[in-house]
Image (cartoon, rainbow, N blue to C red):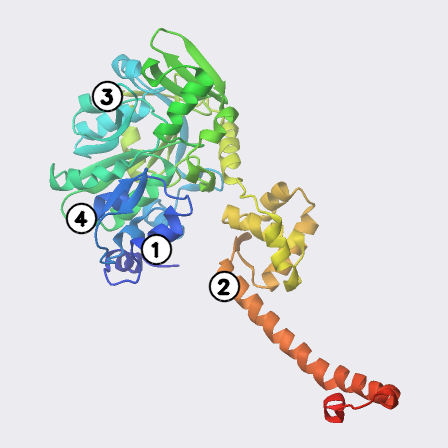
């Protein structure tokens, strides 16, 4: 496993072959950018064009944009070791946790403004009041629901930005403002599972200052998928039949996308009908419960929409949650449906990238079966999985899947650690297979020349030489 010191060296070293072009080639052009704003905040040469990071000046290839991107190298084992203590439980579908419970704010003022039980708002205010943090990077919106990054430094500002927006925005783009303009020493971050991986990198080695902008608290939100602002406008227009200016509040609950209108009307559509409006990178994300947060908060699993499900993960998260409970800022309840949360997480983790027949046609010369290719592609989509999960997805008996995985491991297409299977980089896999194929082909050619050809030439000469006229004998025989 990579060490903390090695990861810090990787993040801080500005001598690298990586540059913005690599970020574009490997992340942006692959529709895997999450619009977190990390690259915008740490590099003045990067701007936004057509909702995508774009190089607007010379690229010195300092590599920071590539290294701090949440979609590039993120050693999970290292960050798990740094964030969570050894006593925390770990669940494949939920991640590390110390406690899972339902909670809601005791403040009516917060409940009137915030989403569901108002736990996120309450915990942020508690963190400000106890001096744990001096500011929060979060999201806000204008009257048209246009999302914008926001730095809250007072309880009143936190409350003003309460509520879910369901639109992707570069929240981390204002990190530089928190550091350079406001000189905030201790920060909190509220955001989506994908964004949190960038924040954890910032926390391990702050890229802008060794004095300001230190993340002390990370609150993650449950997220099955999200939308761009433009796609949200289309969704509201197409499925709900209103404009964004008519919306008072959005919510996602019990498989429904719900819009509360200013006139008191409530309109809802099936969440399945919104899939074509999803942000492009959401289909590649496997994290539903913000597994690398200090505290994760959502609504799935509660008995009603007036409560939040809370997953307390780190010691920092546990201490803050206990402070809020002790000072009676929140109520708690053990009435929580953990199975619902797990099922929602499983649904996201089991998203599989669909392939076409070109792959099968191209790989058939390697002597690998369609079922083996399907199994490998499934692991590429999942990142990792155990035998039970593979059987569930592939819809095959365990002995069949086990034998396929055994063959793939022997061919060095996959690896296994602690009964969990992981795919090996296809660049390495195919390069090795091509080399093997080339070597085998050369052997076959030599065998054909030395054995089959000599035998065939002899038979030909023995039986056909008398019938040929004006023939170059050297050509025929040799």
Rendered residue at 19%/34% (across/down): 133
Comparing labels 4 and 3, the label whose residue is closer to the camera: 4
**Marks 2 and 4 close (CB-CB < 8 Å):** no
Q: CA distance from mark 4 to mark 1?
A: 22 Å
Query: Left or right of 267: which side holds 249?
Result: left
Q: CA distance from mark 4 to mark 3?
A: 28 Å
Rendered residue at 41%/43% (across/down): 31
Residue placed under numbered mark 2 in the picture: 428
Q: Is residue 339 depicted above or below 160 in this figure?
A: below
SS at circle 2: helix
Q: Earlier in the sequence, mark 4 or mark 3?
A: 3
- Which mark is on residue 452? none
SS at circle 4: loop
Rendered residue at 84%/86% (across/down): 459
Residue 223, percent across and down? 41, 32
Q: Earlier in the sequence, mark 3 or mark 1?
A: 1
Residue that lies at the very extreme toward the bottom in this rendered image: 474
Comparing labels 3 and 1, the label whose residue is closer to the camera: 1
Image quadrant holding the N terminus, namely bottom left
SS at circle 1: helix
- Which mark is on residue 208? 4
Residue placed under numbered mark 3 in the picture: 159
Q: Earlier in the sequence, mark 1 or mark 2?
A: 1
Residue 457, percent across and down? 79, 86
């Amino acid at each position: 496993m990579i060490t903390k010191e090695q990861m810090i060296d990787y993040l801080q070293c500005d001598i690298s072959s990586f540059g913005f072009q690599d970020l574009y080639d490997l992340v942006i052009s692959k529709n895997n950018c999450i619009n977190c704003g990390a690259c915008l905040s740490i590099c003045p040469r990067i701007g936004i064009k057509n909702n995508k990071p774009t190089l607007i000046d010379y690229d010195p290839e300092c590599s920071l944009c590539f290294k701090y991107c949440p979609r590039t190298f993120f050693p999970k084992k290292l960050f798990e070791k740094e964030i969570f203590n050894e006593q925390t439980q770990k669940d494949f579908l939920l991640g590390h946790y110390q406690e899972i419970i339902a909670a809601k704010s005791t403040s009516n003022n917060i409940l009137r403004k915030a989403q569901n039980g108002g736990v996120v708002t309450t915990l942020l205010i508690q963190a400000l009041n106890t001096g744990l943090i001096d500011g929060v990077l979060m999201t806000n919106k204008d009257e048209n629901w246009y999302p914008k990054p926001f730095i809250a430094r007072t309880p009143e500002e936190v409350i003003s930005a309460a509520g879910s927006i369901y639109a992707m925005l570069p929240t981390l783009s204002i990190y530089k403002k928190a550091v350079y303009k406001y000189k905030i020493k201790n920060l909190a971050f509220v955001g989506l599972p994908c964004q949190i991986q960038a924040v954890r990198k910032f926390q391990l080695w702050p890229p802008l200052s060794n004095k300001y902008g230190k993340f002390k608290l990370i609150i993650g939100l449950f997220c099955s998928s999200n939308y761009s602002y433009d796609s949200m406008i289309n969704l509201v227009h197409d499925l709900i039949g209103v404009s964004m200016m008519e919306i008072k509040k959005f919510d996602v609950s019990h498989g429904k996308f719900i819009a509360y209108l200013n006139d008191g009307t409530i309109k809802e559509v099936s969440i399945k009908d919104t899939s074509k409006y999803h942000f492009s990178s959401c289909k590649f994300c496997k994290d539903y419960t913000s597994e690398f947060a200090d505290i994760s908060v959502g609504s799935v699993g509660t008995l009603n929409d007036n409560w939040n499900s809370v997953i307390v993960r780190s010691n920092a998260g546990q201490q803050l949650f206990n402070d809020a409970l002790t000072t009676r800022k929140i109520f708690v309840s053990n009435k929580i449906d953990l199975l619902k949360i797990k099922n929602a997480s499983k649904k996201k983790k089991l998203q599989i990238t669909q392939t076409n027949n070109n792959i099968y046609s191209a790989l058939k010369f390697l002597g690998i079966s369609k079922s083996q290719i399907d199994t490998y592609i499934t692991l590429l989509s999942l990142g990792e999985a155990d035998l039970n999960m593979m059987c569930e997805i592939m819809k095959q008996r365990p002995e069949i899947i086990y034998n396929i995985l055994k063959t793939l491991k022997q061919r060095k297409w996959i690896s296994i650690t602690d009964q969990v299977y992981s795919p090996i980089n296809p660049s390495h896999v195919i390069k090795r297979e091509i080399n093997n194929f080339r070597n085998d082909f050369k052997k076959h050619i030599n065998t054909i020349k030395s054995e089959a050809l000599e035998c065939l030439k002899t038979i030909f000469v023995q039986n056909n030489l008398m019938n040929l006229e004006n023939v170059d004998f050297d050509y025929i025989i040799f």
